[in-house]
Image (cartoon, rainbow, N blue to C red):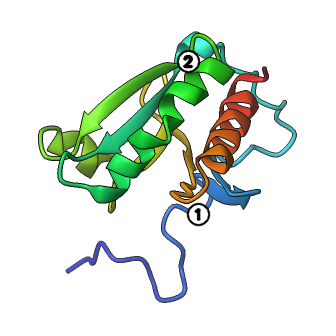
């Protein structure tokens, strides 16, 4: 009988990718091959910000009141945003492992997660700044 659990002390996915928290921005990237060139920046048209929200979510209402998504789009003209209702789009919630709302997740054209924006409900400007930093890092803008 084979277990699908990793051995004790092993880290699932190690070598397949990594996640790093940089200045409040959770960045995900595939682990580089030794000697491989740095990945080219993606065009802005190849990234989408997924905004996971729910109608019953108080934090989501605060995010909306702070106009965080609109401010991000103003700071990064051309940024595509898809609002995801967690009650209606369960497949996306499960695919990306969203555990709470609101969640802002940047994905590439194939749906690979590039990073998650840490949300400060009491400081929408800080959330916007983190989102802009994540998009610029992913797109080289």
Q: Residue at x 70, y 23 (%)?
A: 139
Q: Quadrant of the C terminus?
A: top right
Q: Locate residue 39: give its quadrant.
A: top right
Name the residue furthest bottom.
8
Left or right, residue 15 beside residue 88: right
The answer, for residue 102, to whether it is visible in the render is no
Q: Position of residue 122 (x, y in %)?
A: 55, 59
| Residue 38 position (above or below residue 26) | above
- Relative horizontal placement of residue 105, taking residue 60 as reference (left or right): right
How many numbered marks, from 0 up?
2
Residue sitting nearer the eye, 111 or 76 = 76
Q: In the shown orientation, is residue 106 left or right of residue 22? A: left
Q: Which residue is mark 1?
A: 14
Q: Nearer the viewer, residue 77 or 65?
A: 65
Marks 2/1 in contact by CB < 8 Å: the verdict is no
In which quadrant will I find the N terminus?
Answer: bottom left
Q: Earlier in the sequence, mark 2 or mark 1?
A: 1
User: In the figure, 10 relative to 109: above or below?
Assistant: below
Residue under label 2: 79
Residue 71 at x, y percent in the picture: 58, 28
At 61% from the left and 47% from the top, the residue drawn is 127
> How packed is label 2: few (under 14 Cα within 10 Å), some, or many (20 or more)?
some
Q: Residues within 10 Å of mark 1 (few under 14, many from 20)?
A: few
């Amino acid at each position: 009988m084979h277990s699908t659990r990793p051995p004790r002390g092993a880290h699932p996915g190690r070598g397949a990718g990594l996640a790093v928290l940089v200045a409040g921005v959770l960045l995900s990237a595939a682990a580089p091959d030794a000697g491989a060139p740095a990945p080219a920046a993606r065009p802005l048209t190849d990234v989408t910000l997924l905004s996971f929200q729910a109608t019953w979510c108080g934090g989501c209402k605060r995010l909306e009141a702070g106009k965080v998504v609109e401010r991000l789009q103003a700071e990064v003209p051309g940024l595509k945003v898809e609002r995801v209702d967690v009650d209606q789009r369960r497949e996306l919630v499960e695919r990306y492992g969203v555990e709470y709302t609101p969640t802002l997740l940047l994905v590439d054209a194939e749906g690979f997660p590039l990073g998650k924006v840490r949300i400060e409900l009491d400081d929408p400007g800080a959330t916007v700044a983190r989102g802009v930093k994540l998009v610029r890092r992913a797109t080289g803008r």
